[in-house]
Amino acid sequence: MLDKKKEFLSLPAGAIMAFALFAAAGGAVLSPQTAAVCRAETVTLTDNVFLNLVKYYAKNGDIERAMLELKKLRQMSPENVEYKKFEEVLRAENEKWSQAVPSPESTADGRGAAETPASPRQLPASNFTAEDDLPREVVEKNALLAKGRLRYVYELIGRGEQTQAISKLREITSAEPRFYEANSLLGDLYLGRKNYEDALRAFQNAINTRQDAETNYKLGVCYKALNDIDNAIIRFDTAVRMKPLHEMANLNLANIWRFRKNFKLAKGYYEQALKANSRLAEAHLGMADCIYNEGNIDEATRAYAFIVTNFPGEYSGYLGLARILIHNGQHKEAKVAILKAREIAPQNSQIYEMLGILAYSQKDGKTAVENFKRAVMLDSNSITAYQSLINILIDEKKFEEALTQIKNCLVKFPANPRLYYLAGIIYSGFKNDEMALKNLMESYKLDPENIEVILALAILQEKKFRYKESLEKYREALLIAEENKDMRYINNIHERIDSLEKQVEKYSENK
């Protein structure tokens, strides 16, 4: 157990890609495209999606930005005839487009007025939910009465005295535990301070008095923050049942199911979120990631092309596109996409992870390691950056350094079974069977259904001539392989079991 913990294994080159290609976030990280409001099928791609981005700026009157983007493309591919031809068109049509389209300044002014978000709702307004069984005028009157009773609390909040406001609300709810508005407001204040446990209690008291979609959603937020994902699902699901187009409840459910690799279910929730808000970039990103993971590369390409065209400030869209371009072997185009993402978010660790993946795909191990180390430095809590770095170090046969990185990673992620597994494999290669067994057993405790760990334990026991123990593990692995219909292992495991049964029989006869 790496001193007391740890684990590791040598992975094939392709595994680097799997680990580093964002599982969230997310964060979130990579995400999707829509399904009803903005379908991928509506996007028209030319041979180069980045030229589409140039055209997007040009058609919107931002000729200078279009020329700048085109210049970058020409620097990457100076012989590209299409780039050269379009540059001539841009120069020739500059004056014409300037007359046909409002100037960037006036467009920005107009857009600014249209896109300026409404002022955040004041706390009082967010706490009153209409009861379906009461007339509207009664609901409004009740809300006004409650607001009046909480006037002093709102004054405290208005003066920035939240601690005093919380104290007063606790006093009120202690005397009147079924005062819905007071409990809801108390929950909002705790939630704003990221005091999720107290917020949970307050919202639960509110929901016990009156069921509504928003409070169920807020309960889901609290459970999710406390890593109680199953209860978070229940609350988010309740919210969307009460309000099918609840934007954020649908988005949270979609992200949860995507991270659990149920892409079909996740896509349904992303669709609902996008029906509520077609400009929800995170839902577009999540949808695109689901499509990619389902293996529909062409549709995923269209989805990411839609994102980078319609949300050019979203760096994750470029990274998603880069992932596909690397998969297709289009390394030059992938680099353009990653560098574009770096322009937007120069200190984002995911960008350096993708640069590492690109370098590794080009068989440049040194540059890959440098980029993964940079990613870890920028975000020491990124498990994907650590795992990618560790995997490539193992692939490069730098086992001591890989072991050091596993130890560093286990400080952050002490319950990660794969780290212990990989450590066990490295120690086994070092002929340190005691440490190998400790790490493999730790991995097995954390993930008893992992066939790779079980087989590693079986091999280790067989090496130590513990044939009965080894046979037991092979049989355990066979059950899992047959249940999952995993033909990669079944035949080999049968052979090992037959051989070991003979060894056990021979050992018994010798006794």
Image (cartoon, helix red, strand yellow):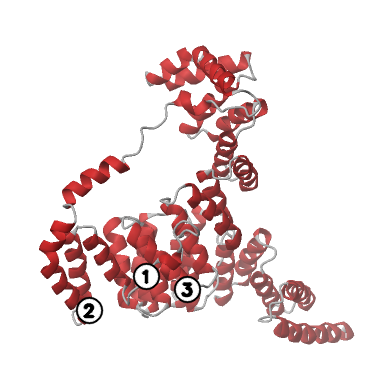
Q: Is residue 434 above or below residue 126?
A: below
Which mark is drawn over residue 82? 2
Nearest the viewer among 198 and 387 is 198
Q: In the image, what residue occupies the spot 39% across and 59% down?
A: 376
Q: Residue at image x 50%, y 50%?
A: 275
Q: How crowded is mark 3: few (under 14 residues within 10 Å), some or many (20 or more)?
A: some
Is 384 drawn above or below residue 497 in the view shown? above
Q: Nearer the viewer, residue 224 or 154?
A: 154
Check contact, mark 1 vs mark 3: CB within 8 A.
no
Q: Does label 1 or label 3 sit earlier along the sequence? A: 1
Q: Is residue 83 left or right of residue 129?
A: left
Measure the C-alpha gap from mark 2 to mark 3. Answer: 25 Å
Tell us which disc is closer to us: 2 or 1: 1
Q: What SS does tag 3 mark? A: helix
- The quarter of the image holding the N terminus is bottom right
Horizontal and vertical percent for residue 370?
34, 68
Q: What element carries label 2?
A: helix
Task: Say what amino acid the circle numbered 3 marks.
Answer: Ile
Q: Can residue 373 be seen in this view?
A: no
Mark 1 crowdedness (10 Å alpha carbons): few <14, some 14-19, many ≥20: few
**Secondary structure beneath label 1:** loop
User: How far is disc 2 from disc 1 in space, using C-alphas?
Assistant: 17 Å
Which comes before the other along the chain, label 2 or label 3? Answer: 2
For mark 3, what is the residue? Answer: 297
Marks 1, 3: nearer the viewer? 1
Task: From the top left corner, tell me how far across and down residue 260 is, in percent.
Answer: 59, 58
State the residue position of label 1.
44
> How much space separates mark 1 and mark 3, taking CA atoms?
15 Å
